Amino acid sequence: MSYLSISTWSLHRLLGPLRFTAWNAETKQHEPQVTEQPQVLTLLELPAELARRGYQAAEVCHFHFPSVEPAYLQQLKESFQSAGIKFDTLLLDYGDLTTADEERREADIRYMQQWIDIASLAGAKQIRIVAGEAAPDNIDALRLSAEGLTRLSQYSQEQGKNVRIISENFKALTSTGSSSVKLLELVGDNADFITDFGNFKLPNKYDEFPLTLPSSVSVHAKAQYDDQGYPDQDEFITCLNTVRAAEFNGAIVLIYDGPGDMWAGLDRIKAIVADYL
């Protein structure tokens, strides 16, 4: 049975500074890039607020972690447990498994391994790894990405982290249904997937969903919004009907990045999604 989840990206104007990561090609180092945002709610307070609003699970973006110290991660784990909210996925937004810069690729993989450790300590079931930024028709890049995802899966298992590796139709490499399926074939049982409504493009958008849904553990339900933050309801329902037709059984994760009050924007799509849970 599908259940209601949310990404912290949908609350990115409420959870404080965004702590992004960038690669400095000159120093060959990862560097933090902080974007200031108001903090209306702390990450530790979020699970209880989600429970109050009727959610069952959450996905947390890596840039929303104010600390990765073990003591803080234990607090975060306990906040999810006490609220009865599942910490489904840590969404790691940085990294390129297909870069031609071998030094950067190895550094990115080490960085991803560190976040697998963080996900484990925080109690996350899985971690989303970006497949890569190479072109979707680049078969060598697809093989390189599959090799990297497999290596990360082996790391998680060998280190006893019990964190499942997943990827997504996100960034260039998996921007088409065919490239996503090819990657999943290459990676085999070492990784699962997320299907995002907003990342497949027209005119083939609705034909591509069914290709990735069988391997997807969650669906990012992102509507097309007008300049007031209201969804194109017909288009959104078409996406949801495609998911229903595929007999998808997993998390339906609400994504809102429009203007205005973010909770209000979420409530508008939550009301539509309710019939699909």
Image: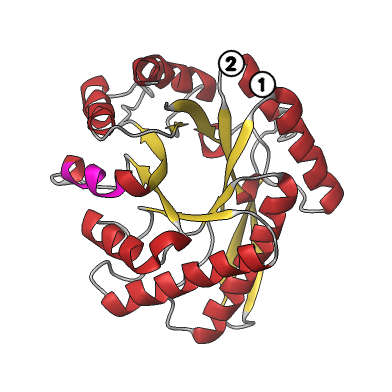
**Whether residue 251 is situated above or below residue 101 in the rendered picture:** above
x 42%, y 26%: residue: 1
One can see residue 25 in this view: no
What residue type is disc 1 on? Glu
One can see residue 147 in this view: yes
Q: Where does residue 109 sit, x and y in percent of width and height?
A: 58, 72
Q: Where does residue 12 sit, x and y in percent of width and height?
A: 57, 37
- Quarter of the figure with the C terminus: top left
Say whether marks 2 and 1 touch (CB < 8 Å): yes
* Extreme residue in the left direction: 203
What residue type is disc 2 on? Arg
In the image, which residues are magenta?
A: 207-212
Please give the residue where the numbered disc 1 appears in the rendered image.
49
Q: Where does residue 272 sit, x and y in percent of width and height?
A: 35, 17
In this orientation, which residue lies closer to the viewer: 122 or 191? 191
**Quadrant in the picture for residue 221:** top left
Check if residue 163 falls in the magenta segment: no
Give the SS element for disc 2.
loop
Please give the residue where the numbered disc 2 appears in the rendered image.
53
**Whether residue 169 is situated above or below residue 252 in the rendered picture:** below
Name the mark on residue 242.
none
Q: In whole angstroms, how far apart are the C-alphas of marks 2 and 1? A: 6 Å
x 37%, y 20%: residue: 273
User: Most prominent secondary structure in the magenta stretch?
Assistant: helix
Please rate how many residues cluster around mark 1, counting C-alpha atoms within 10 Å: few if below 14, some from 14 to 19, many from 20. some
In this orientation, which residue lies closer to the viewer: 62 or 264? 62
Q: Is residue 142 left or right of residue 147?
A: left
